[in-house]
Amino acid sequence: MNDRAPEPVVWRRLFGGASHWLWLAVLVVIADQVTKSWINATLRLYERVPVLDFLDIVHLRNEGAAFSILADAAGWQRWFFIVLAVAVSVAIVVWLRRLPRRGQTRLAVGLVLVLGGAVGNVVDRVVHGAVIDFVYFYWGTWYFPAFNVADTAITIGAGLLILDTLLAGRAEKRAAAQQAPDATGHGAHGIEQGAGKAAGKDAGKDAGKAAGKAADQGAGKSTGDGSADAGDTGRRNGN
C-alpha cells in the first residue's frame, strides 16, 4: 500500500501557477470599458473629432472581428465571437495556472493581455451587440482601421507570445549546441581511454612473452651447464 500523499495539482488552486498576473487582465478590462463608456456618452455614432494631423477620435461600431471581418454577416457572428472569446479566455486561465509562478513572466504577461482584451470586447458584444472602436490613425489617403484599448492589449500580448516562442527556440538551440561539444569531448576521451587500455594490454602481453622466452632460455642454459659439469666429473673419475 502506498502511504505517500498525492502531490497537489498547482493549476487547480485559485491563484496557482502564474495566475497572480490576472490583475493585469482586470486592469485592461477596466481601462477598456471606461474609455468606451466615455466615447459612447460623448460622441454620437460616426462622429469624428480631430486630435492631430494623423489621429482622430471617432465613434464606430464593429460587428465583426479585427479589420471588420464578418461585419456584414446576418448577425450570427455576434454569438460566434462571444463563444469563441469565452473559450479562448478559459483556455488562457487554465494555461496560466499550469505555468510556473516564476520564470515565465513574458509568456504570462502576453497571455493576460490577450485575456483582458478578449474579455473587454466580449462585454461590448453582449451589451451593445458590437465592439466600440474610437482610435483612428491615418495619413493622407491611407488609414488604419479604428481600434480600442482591448485591441491594443491583444496586439501587444500576441507580440509577446511570438517573441517568447522565438526566444525559447533560440535558447533550446543554444543549449543543444553547448551540449554537443561536451558529448564529442566525452566520446574522444572514451576513445583515448580505450586505446590506452588496448595498448597497455598489448604491451603487457609482449612483456609477458619476452619474460617467458628469457626464462626458457635461462633454464636451457642452466641445464646445459649442468650436463657439461657432470661429463667432466665422469671423465675425471674414469681416469
Image: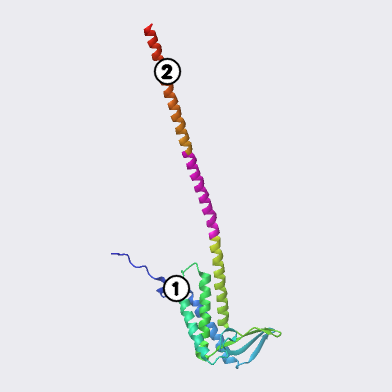
Locate residue 45, reporting x and y percent: 60, 93
Quarter of the view holding residue 158: bottom right
Q: Residues within 10 Å of mark 1 (few under 14, many from 20)?
A: many
Locate residue 29, reporting x and y percent: 52, 82
Q: Nearer the viewer, residue 60 or 72?
A: 72
Q: Nearer the viewer, residue 129 or 113?
A: 129
Q: Does 231 sit above or below residue 86? A: above
Label whose residue precedes the other's in the sequence (2 or 1) = 1
Label the magenta part by its dominant secondary structure. helix
The three-letter code of the residue at mark 2 reads Asp
**Magenta stretch, residue numbers:** 176-201
Locate residue 112, reporting x and y percent: 51, 76
Locate residue 215, reporting x and y percent: 43, 27
Q: Nearer the viewer, residue 100 or 189?
A: 189
At x 49%, y 86%, the residue is 82
Instruction: Check disc 1 and report the residue beneath it.
Output: 97
Contact check, label 2 and label 1, Cβ < 8 Å: no
